[in-house]
Image (spheres, rainbow, N blue to C red):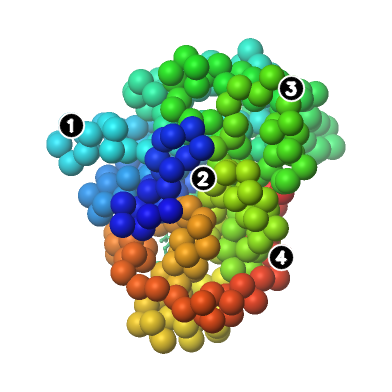
Amino acid sequence: MTTKQQTVRLSDGHFMPVLGFGTFAASEVPKSKATEFTKIAIDAGLRHIDSAALYQNEAEVGIAIRSKIADGTVKREDIFYTTKLWCTSHRPELVQPSLEQSLKKLQLDYVDLFLIHFPMALKPGDDYLPEDENGKLIPDSVDFCATWEAMEKCKDAGLTKSIGVSNFNRRQLEKILNKPGLKHRPVCNQVECHPYLNQRKLLDFCKSEDIVLVAYSALGSHRVKEWVDQNSPILLDDPVLGTMAKKYKRTPAQIALRYQLQRGVVVLAKSFSEKRIKENIQVFDFQLTSEDMKVLDGLNKNIRYIRGST
Ligand code: NAP
C-alpha cells in the first residue's frame, strides 16, 4: 500500500484508493444530499465512492460524478465507484440485470467494483427486506457460489472492473476461494471495522489471500436506529481516542481513520458535512507510533454496531 499515491493494488491488477467516501444516509435525509456531498467530496480530493443498490441514491451519486467529469475536475478513470448486489437479487439470472439497473441509474458505462452485499439471499421482489406475517425475513435458497459465477460474468462483460464481497466471514470466503472452476477471486471483503471491532483474525486471513479488507463504519457507524442499537457506546467519544487526538493535534475521527490505513486496511468515511469531509482527508501527513497502534488494538471489544452484519 502506498499512501503517496493513496491507492492499493488489487489482486486483479486494478488500483483502489485507500480512503473512500461513504454515501449511505438515513431514509429521512433527502437523497439530493448525496449529490451535494459527493460533489464536495470529489472537489476535496476523494476519488473512491461507495454506494449500493440498497442505498437508493445511485441516481443522485451518478449526477455528482458526471457533473464533476463534465466540469473537468476529474475523468471517469480517476473515480473508483463501488456498488453492491442486494440480497433479493442473488439468483444468478438477476445478478447482471441488477448491475445494469445500477448503471442505468448512475448513467455510467461501468462500475469499478461490484460486491455481493451480504452472503445471504432474500426472496426476490420489490421489497428490500421481504418479511413473512411474523415479521421474519424471507430467505431464498441460493448458494452464493452460484451468485459469484454470475458476478464473474459481469466482470467478463466489462460492466465492472473488479468483483468482491461484503460481510463475509472466513468460512464464507473460503467457500468461494475453494469453489471448483473459480475464474476470478474476490479482490476485497468490505466489513464493519473500527477500534471496537478491529477484525484482527479476518484481516490476517484476508492479507494471506491477497484480499483487501475495506472497513465500513470506521468512525463508529451512522447509528441509524433501524440498524444500530442506540445504547451502544459512541466510538468517537472514547477517552483513549480523545487523549491520542490531543497528543497528535488531530481529531478522534482522524486517529480512527489513520489507524486503519497503517494496518493495511482501506477505509471508508461517510460525512455529509463539508468541514468533516475535509477533516477526514487530512490523514496522510502524520504517523501513529507502533506503541500507539498497540494501544488502539487494545480497544477491541468485539462491538458490532450494524445488526445483521457478520
Ligand atoms: P461512518 O463512516 O462510521 O460515519 C459515521 C458518522 O460519523 C457519520 O454519520 C458522520 O456524520 C460522522 N462523521 C464523519 N466524519 C466525522 C468527523 N470527522 N468527526 C465526527 N463525526 C464524523 O458511517 P457509516 O455510514 O456506518 O459507514 C461508512 C460507509 O460505509 C457508508 O456510508 C456506506 O457507504 C458503507 N457501509 C457499508 C455497509 C455494508 O454492509 N457493506 C454497511 C454500513 C456502511 P455527518 O454526516 O454528520 O458528518
Nearest to the eye among marks 3 and 2: give it.
3
The residue depicted at 53 percent of the width and 31 percent of the height is 163
Q: First in sequence: mark 3 or mark 2?
A: 2
Helix, strand or loop status at disc 1? helix
Extreme residue in the left direction: 71
Percent position of residue 27, x then y: 51, 45
The label on residue 84 is none
Q: CA distance from mark 1 to mark 3?
A: 44 Å
Check disc 4 and report the residue beneath it.
302
Mark 2: give few (<14), some (14-19) or many (20+) Cα within 10 Å.
few
Q: CA distance from mark 1 to mark 2?
A: 29 Å
Image position of 161 (left or right of 108): right
Q: First in sequence: mark 4 or mark 1?
A: 1
The label on residue 180 is 3
The label on residue 27 is 2
Q: CA distance from mark 3 to mark 2?
A: 41 Å
Mark 4: give few (<14), some (14-19) or many (20+) Cα within 10 Å.
few
